[in-house]
Amino acid sequence: MSLDTAVQALVDAGAEFVIIGGWSAILHGSRLMTDDLDICFSRSRENLRCLARALAPFHPRLRDVPEGLPFVWDDTTLRNGTIFTLDTDLGGIDLLAEVSGLGTFDDVKAASIAVEAFGRPVWTLDLRSLIKAKRAAGREKDLRALPELESLLEAEEP
Amino acid sequence: MTPEEFKRAAERLRNPAPGSRMEAAKKYGIDLTLLISQLRLTPAERVARMLEAEQVAGRVRGAARRRRP
């Protein structure tokens, strides 16, 4: 099992989410590897229930807190935060309610395209918005992806 | 991407125009010809290849260190 199992579980649970970050770059043709899955999620009550249910079998726990601290994975926990950096049995999964440079889930969804990947229909940022998000994030690893992504965008321009 | 769009994109990546972002990327060290290979694939194929590569990387990661006496 790997991260595609997580994507499939989320889609099958009916979760509303958009793939962002490194996997979005890969979907657009980037060759940079990534070892975690970043998704932007809707904070609607029903969606939080879907997310909690879908990922529960993979035992999510927070990556950025000392081991052993109590952590309850449920929709109430999800309601109390906007960023969750998780370790799961399938690998790292980061859940973000907002994306730098783009905004909340509704803004992100509006800047996304539907693709068939991971064995399911999924939503991911369009290339222009992905570049905007990476630039806004501004971390070294985000900026490193820009030359490739901008080349892909330029090559595909009409 | 239509075959015509792919052909145009591949040609641009093979011969980036002076002053273009592609030329800057090439100077930065990006092998643009590898992006042509990526554009030939569907998003699902790109994911599958990356997952395969990750699995291989996971299996061999640290092998050189483990080999040390």
Image (spheres, helix red, strand yellow):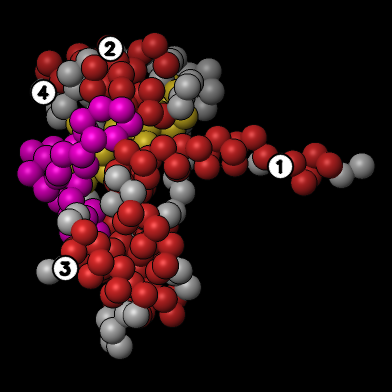
The answer for which chain carries disc 3 is A
Q: What residue type is labelled 4?
A: Ser
Camera-side mark, 4 or 1: 1
Residue A126 versus residue A95: which sits nearer the camera? A126
Label 2 vs 3, first from the N-terminus: 2
Question: SS at mark 3?
Answer: loop
Q: Which mark is residue A157?
A: 3
In this rendering, position of residue B48 left or right of residue A39: right
Q: How far apart are marks 4 and 1 (CA)?
A: 43 Å
Q: Residue A58 location, x and y as percent? A: 42, 16
The answer for which chain carries disc 2 is A
Q: In this view, does A79 lie above or below A129?
A: above
Q: Residue A53 carries which label?
A: 2
Label 4 vs 2, first from the N-terminus: 4
The answer for which chain carries disc 4 is A
Q: Is residue A151 above or below residue A2?
A: below
Q: Distance between the residues labelled 4 and 2?
A: 14 Å
Reading the image, the residue beneath label 1 is B62
Q: Give the range drawn in magenta.
A: A102-131
Reading the image, the residue beneath label 4 is A44
Camera-side mark, 4 or 2: 2
